[in-house]
Image (cartoon, rainbow, N blue to C red):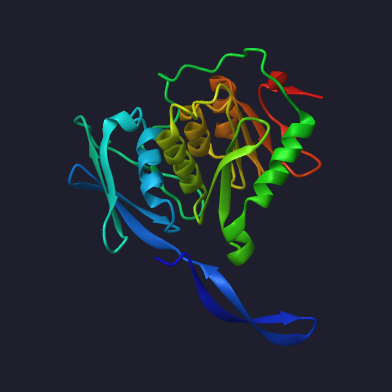
Amino acid sequence: MDISIHTVYDRFESGQWKQIEAEAPVETDVALTVNGEVWTTFMCTPILVEEMMAGFLFNEGIIQGMEDVADVRICEHGDNVDVWTTRSVEQPSKWRRTSGCAGGVTAVVDDASITPLQADGWKVSSGQITRLVEMLFESQELYRETGGIHTSALSDGERVILSAEDIGRHNTLDKIAGLWLAKKPEMDLEHKILITTGRISSEMLQKAVRMGAGILISRTAPSSLAIRLAERYGITLVGYARRHRFNLYTHPERISN
């Protein structure tokens, strides 16, 4: 399935009109079917959709790892992903509609059962934070082609290990989770950093918690609930990150000068 389409638009600039040829990102609906039952539908960019569905189920606490998955298969037309589990799982009785563009769904926000991350002496420098932001920007292949796309990446603090792009910011973290699960245990990093272009809402923070990320970095602002949850769950939350500056909201003990 195509991830971008050719388009033509008119640009008004400096008092003149000019016709522009460009690429636009594809947005399509893909359903998630679990053990033969349709659970929900995602609006997404049609790449890494199988990984996205597995990551979504992990981030929602439905599965604990790929050992709980018997098969993940996308249908011929690309509009449905079937996930078959090795044990019985139940669809949440109530989905919350997530905030933001191309919003998704989530079942749990502010889960009291989650064990907060503890400080263990691990630190990264402020220079590492700004370098990771630059690496994130460099990994934005589809964004450079089309614009209008979010990117998230998983890092060990020195390099970008995994990256994923999607029209929906929530989807990027689900794709990262799916990619990470597929590569475990060899990719079971001791310390994880997530970097994203998307705004950090409570659902984005929840996904970072599920992946065990000690540091979550965004190029935009966190919400008030995300800040509160980051404080509770022991996550160092960084916002408005650029190549030369960032804001530090919670748990500064992991960042050194």
Above-or-below relation of 221 to 6: above
Q: Residue 124 in the image: state x and y as whole percent.
A: 72, 25
Above-or-below relation of 172 to 253: below
The quarter of the picture where the C terminus appears is: top right
> Residue drawn at (34%, 32%), measured in percent from left and top?
66
> Residue drawn at (71%, 87%), measured in percent from left and top?
17
- Position of 78 compared to 135: left or right? left
Q: Residue 183 in the image: state x and y as whole percent.
A: 44, 35
> Residue drawn at (28%, 64%), measured in percent from left and top?
77
- Position of 76 compared to 135: left or right? left
Above-or-below relation of 235 to 172: above
Asked whether the viewer can see residue 221, the reply is: yes
Q: Nearer the viewer, residue 236 or 137?
A: 137
Which quadrant would residue 84 be assigned to in this image? top left
Q: Residue 85 in the image: state x and y as whole percent.
A: 23, 35
Q: Residue 248 in the image: state x and y as whole percent.
A: 72, 30
Above-or-below relation of 114 to 147: above
Q: Nearer the viewer, residue 1 or 256?
A: 1
Q: Nearer the viewer, residue 68 or 27?
A: 68
Across the whole image, how many numbered discs are drawn on residues?
Answer: 0
Asked whether the viewer can see residue 240, the reply is: no
The quarter of the picture where the N terminus appears is: bottom left
Which quadrant would residue 90 be assigned to in this image? top left
